[in-house]
């Protein structure tokens, strides 16, 4: 690893930390701006009294100043002992039950869920991460396996029937929401024909690899629709641009085989923008999981997010927002580093 690349990684890593901190501010601001506050779920309870609300506000520490609430969530309750008037800001749950005292997200403590009866937010998210990442990874793989051939064929047969067929089909697919296509396919293939499972990640009592792949097939195909549309369009455009370059004409004039020209000169250079788009496709799959996971009853973070939204479970929503933001930032950073490996012409210098 060159010194310039090392300096670049360090600089981008520090920038990523700052962006991640801003993500925590955004998550906390959404929490503060939410109408009704986190205790709104009690509004429909006829037994609720003002005293009950005051007691719960004290218990959860939301009767304190906004800055104190953010510091407790970000750095932990024990920081209050170092603040002016710290004793008056100390949460009742810390005094009466130290095990329920927040240690802060810096120490990977995102608090406890309202809806799931006090379970750890981090445990809830980590439990559902494998399902979400499995679906996102399968979506990315199918996007590449289908999008690359479509883009190559469309570029090589420009203005001919294969190109027209691919372009028209991708435009038609892009006009229809992917989750709606998934719902229709689920009704037809799962409900009427019985070819695919109606939902879930595995059959109860089975859990074999074949059974898991059977459940994964339709959600991954539907989730990959947007990916292969984007990949095919980008690759077609880039290949057409590279095919008109002088070095490609020179390679053909030297008598190189057409396959050698396409693989070593055209496709290799056309894949540069494609590499940077991989992170976008993966992040799109993660962000779209809230739709696909609920259509296919997939037990991942997206389904957890919908439950948290419907039940006003603010700790879970904030934890999902922060963890999702950090994953996105790490994905972009990894793609930046990968781009330097794919294209040695890239120079990383401190400015």
Image: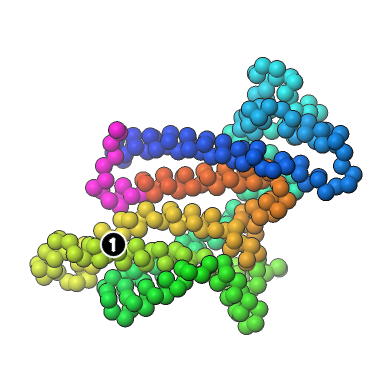
Query: In this rendering, would 98 be left or right of 319?
Result: right
The segment highlighted magenta reads 338-351
Vertically, is 85 above or below 260? above
Q: Is residue 304 above or below residue 54?
A: below
Judged from this view, the residue extending furthest toward the front is: 35
Residue shown at 52% from the left, 65% from the top? 223
Task: Specify the color scheme.
Answer: rainbow
Tell me residue 21's x, y (percent): 52, 35
In the image, residue 265 sits, relative to residue 101, either above or below, namely: below
Q: Quadrant of the C terminus?
A: top left
Q: Is residue 169 something one can see in this rendering?
A: yes
Asked whether 232 or 142 is in front, the reply is 232
Answer whether residue 325 is magenta in the image.
no
Tell me which residue sits at (19%, 64%) in the image.
Answer: 244
Viewer-closest of 145 and 243: 243
Residue sticking out furthest to the right: 47
Q: Give the overall secondary structure of the magenta segment.
A: loop
Label 1: how many Cα within 10 Å (few below 14, some 14–19, many 20+): many
Residue 350 is covered by the magenta coloring: yes
The residue at the point 66 percent across, 29 percent down is 66
Q: Quadrant of residue 141?
A: bottom left
Residue that numbered label 1 is attached to: 238
- Disc 1 is placed on an element classified as helix
| Quadrant in the rendering for residue 133 | bottom right
Q: Left or right: 235 with respect to 23? A: left
Q: Quadrant of the N terminus?
A: top left
């Amino acid at each position: 690893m060159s010194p310039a690349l090392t300096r670049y990684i360090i600089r981008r890593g520090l920038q990523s930390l700052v962006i991640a901190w801003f993500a925590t501010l955004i998550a906390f601001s959404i929490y503060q701006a939410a109408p009704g506050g986190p205790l709104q779920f009690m509004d429909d309870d006829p037994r609720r009294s003002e005293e009950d609300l005051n007691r719960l506000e004290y218990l959860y520490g939301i009767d304190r100043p906004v800055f104190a609430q953010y510091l407790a969530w970000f750095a932990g309750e024990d920081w209050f002992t170092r603040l002016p008037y710290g004793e008056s800001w100390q949460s009742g749950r810390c005094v009466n039950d130290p095990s329920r005292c927040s240690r802060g997200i810096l120490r990977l403590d995102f608090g406890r869920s309202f809806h799931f009866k006090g379970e750890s937010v981090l445990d809830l998210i980590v439990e559902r991460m494998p399902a979400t990442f499995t679906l996102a990874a399968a979506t990315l793989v199918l996007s590449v396996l289908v999008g690359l051939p479509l883009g190559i064929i469309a570029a090589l047969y420009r203005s001919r029937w294969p190109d027209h067929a691919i372009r028209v089909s991708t435009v038609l697919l892009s006009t229809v929401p992917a989750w709606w296509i998934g719902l229709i396919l689920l009704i037809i293939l799962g409900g009427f024909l019985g070819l695919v499972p109606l939902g879930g990640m595995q059959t109860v009592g089975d859990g074999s690899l074949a059974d898991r792949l059977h459940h994964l097939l339709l959600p991954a195909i539907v989730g990959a629709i947007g990916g292969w549309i984007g990949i095919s369009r980008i690759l077609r455009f880039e290949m057409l641009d590279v095919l008109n370059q002088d070095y490609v004409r020179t390679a053909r004039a030297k008598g190189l085989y057409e396959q050698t020209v396409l693989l070593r000169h055209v496709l290799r250079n056309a894949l540069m923008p494609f590499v940077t788009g991989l992170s976008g496709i993966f992040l799109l799959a993660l962000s779209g999981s809230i739709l696909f996971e609920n259509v296919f009853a997939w037990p991942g973070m997206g389904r957890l997010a919908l439950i948290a939204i419907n039940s006003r479970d603010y700790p879970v929503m904030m934890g999902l927002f922060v963890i999702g933001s950090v994953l996105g930032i790490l994905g972009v950073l990894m793609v930046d580093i990968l781009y330097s490996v794919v294209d040695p012409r890239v120079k990383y210098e401190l400015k």
